[in-house]
Image: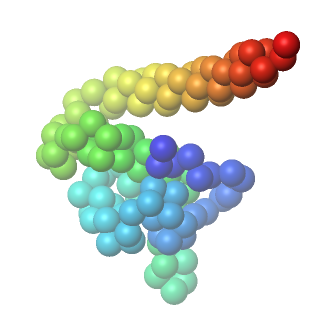
């Protein structure tokens, strides 16, 4: 799942780091920044973008709507504008369900190994 690459909490993320988190190129990050009002990176003295954790969370919402659920850019904008809390709640639910699915798959894998070992014993 894209976005699962965040391991430590940072104050700011570079555009390259954000692109790696979502496995997209930096031009897409810049495009989404221009298209979606909820992305508002700060800039350092050199003009480099400094994305906060809140920006990364907003990219998660956008990524979920556009890349995973197939919304158009305009459709995602409308969804976020008209129902921002619903969008966030849906995203959180999907994230939780994916985690549960992964956990259950691990349990099943462990049970399969145990069953194979039990069948090998005389």
Residue plotted at (16% across, 45% down)? 72
Q: Position of residue 32 (x, y in %)?
A: 30, 59
Q: Tell me which colouring the rendered structure shows.
A: rainbow
Q: Nearer the viewer, residue 112 or 47?
A: 112
Q: Image height check: is 94 above or below 73?
A: above
In this view, which residue lies farthest toward the front? Answer: 122
Residue 122 in view: yes
Residue plotted at (51% across, 86% down)? 46
Residue 107 in view: no
Q: Image height check: is 54 above or below 110?
A: below
Residue plotted at (30% across, 47% down)? 67
Residue 86 relative to residue 11: left or right: left
Residue 114 relative to residue 43: left or right: right
Q: Which quadrant does the C terminus fall into?
A: top right
In this view, which residue lies farthest toward the right? Answer: 122
Residue 49 relative to residue 78: left or right: right
Q: Image height check: is 56 above or below 83?
A: below
How many marks on residues?
0
Q: Image height check: is 20 above or below 49?
A: above
Q: Position of residue 86 (x, y in %)?
A: 34, 23
Q: Nearer the viewer, residue 53 or 101?
A: 101
Q: Nearer the viewer, residue 109 or 54?
A: 109
């Amino acid at each position: 799942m894209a976005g699962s690459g965040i391991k430590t909490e940072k104050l700011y993320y570079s555009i390259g780091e954000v692109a790696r988190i979502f496995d997209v190129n930096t031009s897409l990050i810049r495009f989404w920044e221009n298209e979606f009002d909820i992305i508002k990176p700060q800039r350092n003295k050199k003009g480099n973008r400094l994305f906060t954790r809140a920006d990364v969370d907003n990219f998660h919402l956008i990524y979920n709507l556009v890349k995973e659920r197939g919304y158009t850019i305009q459709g995602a904008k409308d969804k976020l504008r008209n129902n921002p809390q619903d969008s966030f709640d849906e995203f959180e639910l999907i994230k939780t369900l994916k985690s549960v699915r992964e956990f259950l798959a691990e349990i099943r894998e462990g049970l399969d190994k145990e069953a194979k070992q039990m069948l090998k014993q005389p």
